[in-house]
Image (spheres, helix red, strand yellow):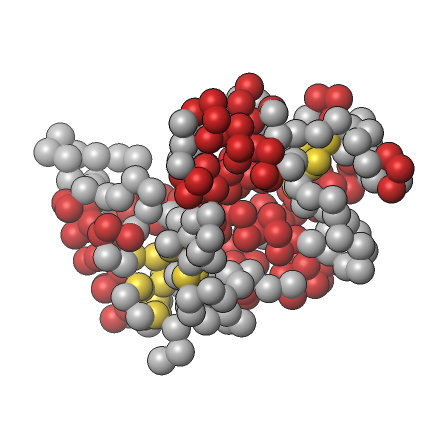
Amino acid sequence: MMLTAGGAWADDASVRAYLSENGCVVGPQARMAQEMPTPELHDTLTTYAEAALARGEADRHGDWIVLGPEICTIQPPKIDTRYDIASPVVQRGIGAVDAYAEFEEYGCFIVGEDMQQALMQQEGLTRDAAAVAYYRILAEGVRSGRVSFFSDDPLRTPMGFQVLTGDCADVPGIDAIRRSQALMLEHFDTLVRDNANRVTCEANGAPVTVEVAQTLAELTNGEAVNAWTMMDMMMLAIGAGWVEGINATERGTPRPPICSHDE
């Protein structure tokens, strides 16, 4: 992103690039992102967003201004995590590819409790910190195309999130899994905005609804077949900080752009 010698943002394109990577929203500085913007940058973002609001290219939702799709495209968010799916401590929570063969389920499924216990025991994390780290690991896995929660049948719940790399990729339907997820990431802006029309920003509410799978299927003429797209998107929303106050016991409160406020 372009900066002038004095540190000020050089042009609207730089501002839009930052916003695109952070949900196309501007709100209170301390709630903006995992790495909150500097006061100077926050002032620039606020000025930009308020000007867009005045032009009718943005909407206000509570403490947030959501920029419209004509000036900002919501990209799959970058996830701030010190671990990823390949970290040795994380590997302790990943099952063998044939662990559920007796149920005719094949894939390296992630066992959330095992992974969180490993993070607490090896890394010294608290229960809440381990839960947040776990969510971010899954989110980064989804964003990078290495993890997905997949079934093409809405009545068949997957055993869990599964790893899509290495030997774990040698499973039936891997091409459909990868393609469905790639299409979700490609249409992320449309899916987030469509979801926000159905979800209000209320405590303990589900941040993503099941309807996103149908929306994606329609956008792709049936090419995307994951009936559980909501789970991949929910992890991205949590990992990006779009669900505030979530931990081991609290479901948290979704905030824009994944939801909207009734005005």
Residue at horizontal 33 percent and vertical 46 percent from the top: 33
Query: Quarter of the image holding residue 17?
Result: top left
Looking at the image, the residue that sits furthest to the front is: 121
Residue drawn at (66%, 29%), measured in percent from left and top? 94
State which quadrant residue 67 falls in: bottom left
> In the depicted view, which residue is nearer to us: 131 or 1?
131
- Residue 22 position, x and y percent, is 38, 48
Compared with 111, 33 (above or below) is below
Q: Quadrant of the C terminus?
A: bottom left
Q: Position of residue 165 (x, y in %)?
A: 68, 26
Task: Point out the residue furthest to the left here.
Answer: 6
* Residue 29 percent location from the top left of the image: 22, 52
Between residue 236 and residue 21, name the one nearer to us.
236
Left or right: residue 147 compared with residue 248: right
Does residue 74 appear anywhere in the picture? no
Q: Does residue 105 appear in the picture of this structure? A: yes
- Relative height, residue 225 to residue 202 (above, below): above
Total numbered badges shown on the rendered structure: 0
- Closer to the camera, 10 or 42? 42
**Position of residue 246 in the picture relative to residue 18 (left or right):** right
- Residue most toward the bottom? 263
**Front-most of 99 and 230?**
99
Determine whether 32 is above or below 80 in the image: below
> Residue 100, position in %: x, y?
81, 36
- Quarter of the image with the N terminus is top left
On the image, which quarter does residue 222 sit in?
Answer: bottom right
Q: In the picture provided, is 73 more to the left or to the right than 43?
A: right
Most extreme residue toward the top, as rendered?
Answer: 88
